[in-house]
Image (cartoon, helix red, strand yellow):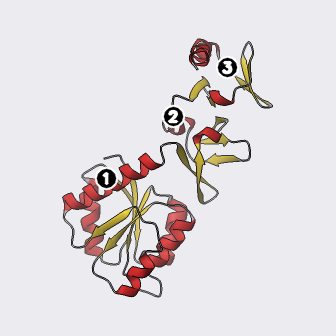
Amino acid sequence: MKALQIYIVEDEPLIVSTIETALLKHGCKIVGDAEDVLSALKDIKTLQPDLILVDIQLQGVHDGVDLAQELDKAQLPYLYLTSQTDPETIQRVKQTNPLGYIVKPFTESGLRSNIELAWHNYESQNNDFLMLKCEGRLHKVNQNSILYLKAFDNYCYVHTPSKTYLVPHTLKHMSEQLNKEHFIKTHRSYWVNINHIDSVGVDELVLKTESIPVSASQKSLVMSKLKSK
């Protein structure tokens, strides 16, 4: 399983401990947990996990469905943790968009396989998209719309024709998610979508009005890639 960063929203400490133990064995990282919706929302905004496990029945005024509605607005992926629940709650659940359901009581293997399958389907459906964390929100951006990516210390700028996103990941990390049929490294600080290249100079590429440097070490690879298109 991919080393997912997972956040758990569950008000039973024993279940939280069971989940943590099971998933740590399989290389996942548990970045935090909460017993109530308000604490979870605050943590999720700060920690920005890959996936959230949401118990439907929580203590307090708000339940897991209320949390799910907020996660849907932010386009954050989540799985429900469920036991038998009342018809009214089930109707509310139908209005949300989880990746799936983990039914209680669950086994360690069942928990892992449910998460693995749900995440695989999620990645398959979003293969041509990048999920960009920027300014406390998650943005779903089609890779085809991206002009180029530029390194900025431990951050990375993702440029599209309409907006520039500053994401809290290195250029190397972001480049690993790119479709290599369309993107190529032109310089240690740049990855470029070759579909948006308008012209090629001696040591630069031009995209719209943007000039992107091409290093001597990358030029032959860039030219070869352009000729193969």
Q: Amino acid at mark 3?
A: Val
- Residue drawn 45% across the image and 49% down it: 125
Q: Amino acid at mark 2?
A: Asn
Q: Which residue is mark 1?
A: 116
Q: Look at the numbered disc 1 and give the secondary structure of its residue.
A: helix
Tell me residue 146's x, y (percent): 64, 39
Q: Which mark is residue 179?
A: 2
Q: Earlier in the sequence, mark 2 or mark 3?
A: 2
How far is disc 1 from disc 3 in space, using C-alphas? Answer: 39 Å
Q: Amino acid at mark 1?
A: Glu
How far is disc 2 from disc 3 in space, using C-alphas? Answer: 20 Å
Q: Which residue is mark 3?
A: 214
Tell me residue 171's x, y (percent): 57, 36
Residue 100, above or below 55: above
- Residue drawn 30% across the image and 49% down it: 27
Residue 60, above or below 4: below
For discs 2 and 3, the disc positioned in front in the rendered view: 2
Q: Earlier in the sequence, mark 1 or mark 3?
A: 1
Residue 8, above or below 181: below
Tell me residue 205's x, y (percent): 72, 22
Q: Is residue 12 visible from the viewing direction of this image?
A: yes
* Marks 1,3: beta carbons within 8 A: no
How far is disc 2 from disc 1 in space, using C-alphas? Answer: 22 Å
